[in-house]
Image (tube, grey):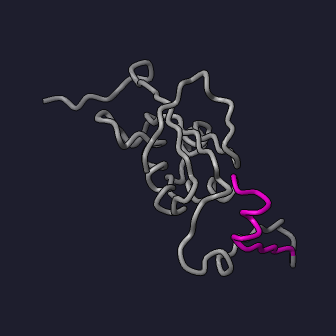
Amino acid sequence: MKTLSPKKNEIERKWYLVDAKGKTLGRMASKIAAILRGKNKSYFVPHMDCGDFVVIINAQDVHTTGMKKEQKMYYTHSGQYGKLKSTTLKKMLDEKPEKVVKLAITGMLPNNKIRKQILMKLKIYAGPEHKHEAQNPELLKI
C-alpha cells in the first residue's frame, strides 16, 4: 500500500469564522492552531501547509482563567542593554487584543519555515466587524 501525499493544487481550503467572545484563550488557540495547520483533514502531512483560513472576531472579549490578567507578562527586547520592556495581559488586551490572540496561536505552531505561511491565513479583528464576507466563512463552534 502506498502512502499518498497531496499536491498543492489538490488541497481544498475553507474559511472559518470564530467568535472569541467569552472563550478561554488557550483552549481556543490550540483548536485554531490545529485547523490552521490542517490537522483536521484526512490528508494532513507535517511538511506541507494544508490548513484552512480562520477569521477571529471579538478578540477584545477573550477570557482567561485565574489571575492571568494581572500576573501574565509579555516581554519585548530591543537588543540593547537595559531595554527589556514588560506589559501585563490586561494592558495588552486594552491596547492590542489582536496581538494577544496571535501570540497565543503562534506559540502553538511549529517553529519552522511553514509557520509564516500558516500565520498568513489567520485574520484577527478586535470587534465584531470583519471584511471577509465575500469568502462566506462558516461559523466554527469551539
Q: For the view shown, which residue lies furthest in the left direction?
A: 1
**Which residue occupies the foreground of this view, 14 or 64?**
64
Residue 84 in magenta stretch: yes
Q: In the rendered view, does 12 fall on the left or right side of 91?
A: left
Q: Is residue 76 above or below residue 114?
A: below
**Which residue occupies the foreground of this view, 117 or 60?**
60
User: Where in the figure is residue 44, as x and y percent of width and height?
Assistant: 34, 37
Q: In the rendered view, does 52 fall on the left or right side of 98?
A: left
Location of residue 57 (image quadrant): top right
Q: Residue at x 72, y 63 (%)?
A: 93
Which residues fall within the magenta stretch?
83-98
Residue 53 in magenta stretch: no
Q: Residue at x 77, y 72 (%)?
A: 87
User: Where in the figure is residue 102, as x and y percent of width and height?
Assistant: 63, 53
User: Where in the figure is residue 54, as x and y percent of width and height?
Assistant: 54, 39
Q: Residue at x 72, y 71 (%)?
A: 90
